[in-house]
Amino acid sequence: MSGEPWLILPTYNEAENVEAIVTAAGDVLATAAPDGFCVLVVDDGSPDGTGRLADGLAEQHDWVRVLHRSEKNGIGPAYLAGFRHALDGGAGYVMEMDSDFSHDPADLARLLAAVFAGADLALGSRYVPGGGVKDWGLLRRLVSQGGSTYARIVLGLRVRDLTGGFKCFRREVLEAIQFDGVRSQGYAFQVELTYRAVQGGFTVVEVPILFRDRERGQSKMSWRIAAEAMWLVPRLRFR
């Protein structure tokens, strides 16, 4: 059905989480988008069998689809491939979320509601009143919040959580910001998407969320990803 919400779930070695996260997201979206929705798992050739488990879910549910990629080359390219697939499939709204329960699937309904109410891009935000993080050490808090503050100052934006990966876009936003030209990864990828949306004149709202550390599996975060954001953000501002 044209115009329905699509949720993009990038995975790499998420066999411990993929079935539970897809099921939980589907339960929420069935209520939030009763006219139809899709959950698209984008698997980067996970050696632990994540893609095979996702295929099994697609056989059970007509609202699950799987996009298999041959190798792991970053969350940015995985999301871009998912975005293209969703738009080609007629998505009216495109959502992104981590696959490890760091983001609460229940909050999908709140992001959708914000866009249905008029926002062009709704961000799940840790750094607005009512938002926060749980189970993080001091160093990780400083790196994350410091990265958002740094990007906000350099880019001259009012958005407080620029590095988060929990978002809902109207289709028109992704079409207008030429997302195929985004080449950054990790933190910088999320910053660049939001910056392009603001530069395009779209309305961005922040929805407070509580971000939790993953309980199962291994984090994909690295210092290389954080460092990339440090040097790419000024390039966004001054190119």
Image (cartoon, rainbow, N blue to C red):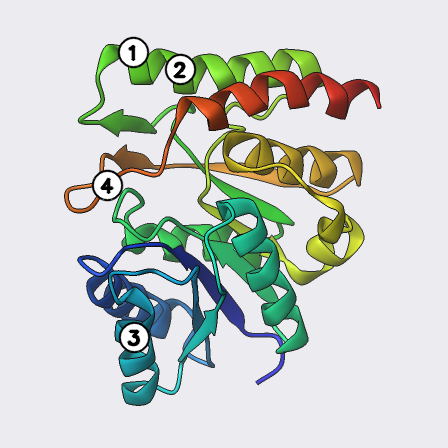
- Residue 72 in picture, x, y percent from top left: 46, 52
Per the image, label 3 sits on a secondary structure element best described as helix
Q: CA distance from mark 4 to mark 1?
A: 18 Å
Q: Which residue is mark 4?
A: 218
Q: Which residue is mark 1?
A: 139
Q: Counting other residues with Cα less than 10 Å from the Cα at mark 2, is it few (<14), some (14-19), or many (20 or more)?
A: few
Whether residue 153 is visible: yes
Q: Looking at the image, do the residues carrying marks 2 and 1 touch, with CB atoms under 8 Å apart? A: yes
* Sequence order check, earlier mark of 4 and 1: 1
Q: Looking at the image, do the residues carrying marks 4 and 1 touch, with CB atoms under 8 Å apart? A: no
Number of the front mark, 4 or 2 = 4
- Residue 81 in picture, x, y percent from top left: 59, 61
Number of the front mark, 1 or 3 = 3
Q: Is residue 119 above or below residue 239?
A: below
Q: Counting other residues with Cα less than 10 Å from the Cα at mark 1, is it few (<14), some (14-19), or many (20 or more)?
A: few
- Residue 26 in picture, x, y percent from top left: 31, 70
